[in-house]
Every structure is written in structure tokens, then in C-alpha cells.
Amino acid sequence: MPEPEPVIVTSDLRRTFKSRRGAVEAVAGVSLEVLSGEIFGFLGPNGAGKTTTLRMLATLLPPSSGEATVAGHDLRRHPDLVRQRIGYVGQSGGADPDVTGRTELQFEGRLYGMDSGQARRRAGELLASLELEACADRKVKTYSGGQRRRLDMGIGLVHSPELLFLDEPTTGLDPQSRARMWEEVRQLRERGTTVFLTTHYLEEADALCDRLAIMDHGLIVAEGTPDALKRAVAGDVVTLGVKGQGEAALQLLRSQPFVREASLDGDLVRLYVDRGETAAPALLRLLDTAGLELTTLVMSRPSLDDVFLRQTGRSLRESQAVA
Amino acid sequence: MKLMRDTWLVFGRYFSIFIHNPAWVAVGVLQPAIYLLLFAPLLKSIAHMPGFPPGGAYNVFVPGLLVQLGIFGASGVGFSLIAELREGVVERLRVTPVSRLSLLLGRAMRDTLTLLVQSLILVLIALPFGLSIQPLGMLVVLALVGLIGLMFASISYWLALVLRDENSFAPVIFTAALPLLLLSGVLLPMSLAPSWLQTISTLNPLSHAVTAARAIFLGNIANGNVGLGFLIMAALALLAVAGAARSFGRAIA
């Protein structure tokens, strides 16, 4: 099977903003590759540089330095050619509130060179597949958050681009609308569209992305599939309650080959293991053989927050709460 | 050609928004209409004073009112651009291959059309009061108002791109427009002014537009003043459009 072609390749992409307080390097050298047909995510706290990077790749912001090839064309030299092949959905969309959804889709189609018949048909297709037929002929300002986001996505997809940029696609949506958006994104991948999204939601990055890059302070601090990232850094956490015999249990288990780290917290033995699902039966057998009484067992899978914490020393959840 | 096609598309979009919101047209005519109904009658008593131009109160006042409409009506278009910048509409359009220049021209065309409709309404309202105008004169005056509108709309869009915020935009527009208005003889003809004020007013290009408009309403279309007024406004409109186009090109490349 042929290797998937990279749809985006960047090399030391940078963007500096001049403000009254001096120059701020929002993107401090990003080099990445996004493969055709994958959902690639940028995860990081607010202010990490995700949106700035995305806007550079979508030709909205010129890079201060660095190179990039997007959808087969040089970003800095031929942004007009890049625009023919990408779609973009910004954080607040871009639909005019005083216009109907259908009108927006048709107008967008015509901007890409469709004649009015083609544009009308394409708008009809998108309205149907995004379940917007009920509100198609009402003004956008009457739409719910979920409808609005689906319309925004439709606008980005009018010309069937091979690459779609989504900036924080589900921010502000209720759980149901969010799940719906995730389905839409997965369907895009089914149809062969490459998706590049930014998010500060751990669950979103975990559930949706084939590969992701974690960004902090303008740099990529970790990159890979969600599973690989989690395994490499954290492992599973197994917490055992061993009544009164915590010390003994600790000594027994810490030397086991599949246990990376072990610590005692009162009556609870906390173990970092490679794979919780294979470690648990082994732990039970060991404790039983040694005559130690196991009262509770809790297994927690690592999260991307653990990955972020390991790489940056901060918790993504906490920095979200503060922001 | 792509520019023409895109400009037509953009014009069509904004025109359709205009059609679906006819209230805006009425709002634009409201202020001049109030001047017409409540202020113009006061001019009747001074219409035969020395220094007051010939033609009767309304034939002197309405041309000025049309120029005022051109200035203020067109200056306000920047607000909608600021709103669009904030809503992300401009950004979304930037990602498409649409011609950047067409985004300005299409809007300006719609704004000029709105202005012409409003001018027509104003003249129609004034006719029963004693305003007299020939159909050809009407067309010529509309062309003049169109040029004024084009100039101020372009300046308004340029300013909107620079300031990007309603709170700084509004004061600049209205502070700049008021002296221009007063110095162009719109409310009261400049021939009533002391000579120092008259001199300053000749430096104001709009006073020539007002003079031209008054000449047209008197039926002197072939007057030298009319030619001068058109020339000045056409040159300024061209400059303003070119300046705004460059600014558009750079700001939303």
C-alpha cells in the first residue's frame, strides 16, 4: 500500500507580533507533517499559538519566517493556489447574521466559480447532509449554536476541499452538538478529506484525532497518536488498597518487571504500570500468593493531561481553569 | 474578467441584503427629510434677501441637502464593515479566491445605489413644497451625488479598516464631517457669509459641489460651475477609491 502523501509540511514556521511591550513570538518554530486523509489536531492551552499556526497555514496570516507546503503549493509564494484547495472554519465562523444559511452556501459556491445552478444544487446537498434543511431559509442570527457551527462547516466545504481547517470546532457547544460535530468530522475523513483542527479540549483531541501535536508557548512539545503519547509518558495507574499491609505490598510489587514506579499513600499502593489490563491479574495473583488482602483496586488510564503535565510541568486542566 | 464577475457577485449579495432590509433606506432619508420639513420653511423669509442665491428657498436648500445626504449617508458605511470584520465574515471571504478589490467595489456600488434611491425620495418629497427640477437635471444631480457618495464611502471603508472599532470610528467620522458640511454652504448659502469664511469655503471641494447642484436646479446644466463641481468630485472620488482599494489590498491580502 503506498505511503499517504503529506498534505501539509512545515519547516520552522514562525510568527512574531509587535506590540507596545515589544515583540511577542506567538509561534516559535513549528515543523510538522500532516498526512492525507487523517484528522490531525493541535492541542494546547489558550495562547499556545495553535490558532496563529492554523491561520498561517490557511493563508490568513503571513509567516514571519519558515517554509510550508499546503495542499501541494508553497504557502508563501502561491497562497492563491493554496486557497483553491483548502476550506477554513474560524472560531466564530463567518456567516453573515442577516442572511439565510442557504444564501451563504450559494454565495460561497459562486465565489469558487460555480454557476448559479451548480451553487444551488451544492447548497441543497450540504443542507441535507448537515441536517440544516429546517432552518435553511431563516436568517443565520436565529440559528442555535449547533446549527451555526454546522453551517460554518458547510461553508468551508462548499468546494469539496481536500483539506479543511477547523479552529476550535466545538467551543461553546452543548455535549449533544459536540458529539454531532465529531460525527461530521469523522464522516469527512471517511470521504477522504484531511482535517486539521485546533482544540483545548482533551477529550476532543483524544476521541477525534488520528495524530496530534501538543503545543505550548509557541512550540510543539509532543507529537504522535493519542495512544502512543499516553503510553510513552504515563502508563496506567493502578491503585491498590491493601489493609494494614501497605508496606509489605509495596516491597513485593515494586520489584516486579511490569511496574515502572511504585509509591505508598497511607493504605494505598499506587503503581505505574505499562498495561493495566495485563498487570491487574498478575497483581491479584501475587498478592494472593503472598497472603496479602486486597480490599480495593482502581485502574485509571492515562490522559493527555498527564502527557501535557510531563512535558510542560503544568496541567492543561488547571491552566484552562485559570484562563 | 474575474474582477468584474466577482464585483457583480459581491454587489448582488449586498444589494439583496439591502432589499431585505428596506428600513435602512428610510432611516437614511429621515434626517434630511426632517431638515426639509422643519428647517427649510425658515429660509422662505430670507429668500429675497440680498446675497441669497436665486431660485427660491427650496431650490437653494435641497441641493445642499442632497450633498449632506451624500456626505453623511456614505460616511456611515464603515460601520457595517467593522461589524463584518468582527463577525469573521471578512476573514472567511479572504480564504476564498474572490478578488480583494471586488470586495470594496461591490460594496461601494451598493452604497452608491442606496444613496441614489434616497436622493430620489428626498427630491420627490420636496416637489410639493415648491422645488422645481427638470428630468435631465435630476439625472445630472444624481450623478453628482453618486460621486460624492463614492468618495465618502471609500474614505469610510478605509477608516474602518484602520480603526476597526466603532467607538473610535464614530467620533472621527462625525467630527470630520461637520466642518465640511458647514463650510460647503449646505444649511445656509455661503454667499451670506463674511468674506473670510467665504474664502475658506472655496478651499472646501464640497462647496463647489453644492454650487454645481444649485446651478443644476436652476436649470443651468451647461454652467461652468457644474463642470467644475463634477471635475473636482470625480477626481476626489477616483483618489478615494484608489486609496481605499490599496488599503483593502494590504489589510486583507
Image (spheres, rainbow, N blue to C red):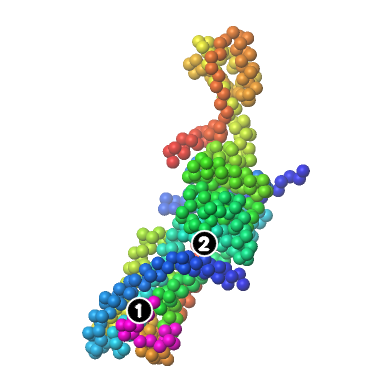
**Residue at 25% from the left image edge and 84% from the top image edge:** B44
**A320 and B220: which one is in front?**
B220
Q: Chain of mark 1?
A: B
Q: Is residue A308 above or below residue B171?
A: above
Marked residue chain, label 2: B
- Quarter of the picture holding the N terminus of chain B: bottom right
- Mark 2 residue element: loop
Q: Could you tell whether B6 is left or right of B29 in the image?
A: right
Residue at 26% across, 75% down: B38
Callout 1: 10 Å neighbours few (<14), some, many (20+)?
A: some
Front position in the image: A74 or B191: B191
Q: Nearer the viewer, residue A33 or B209?
A: B209
Q: Is residue B131 on the magenta stretch?
A: yes
Question: Is A276 rendered above or below residue B182?
Answer: above
Kind of residue at badge 2: Ile
N-term mark: 2 or 1: 1
At label 1, the amino acid type is Ile
Which disc number belongs to residue B252?
Answer: 2
Tell me the residue that label 1 is attached to.
B125
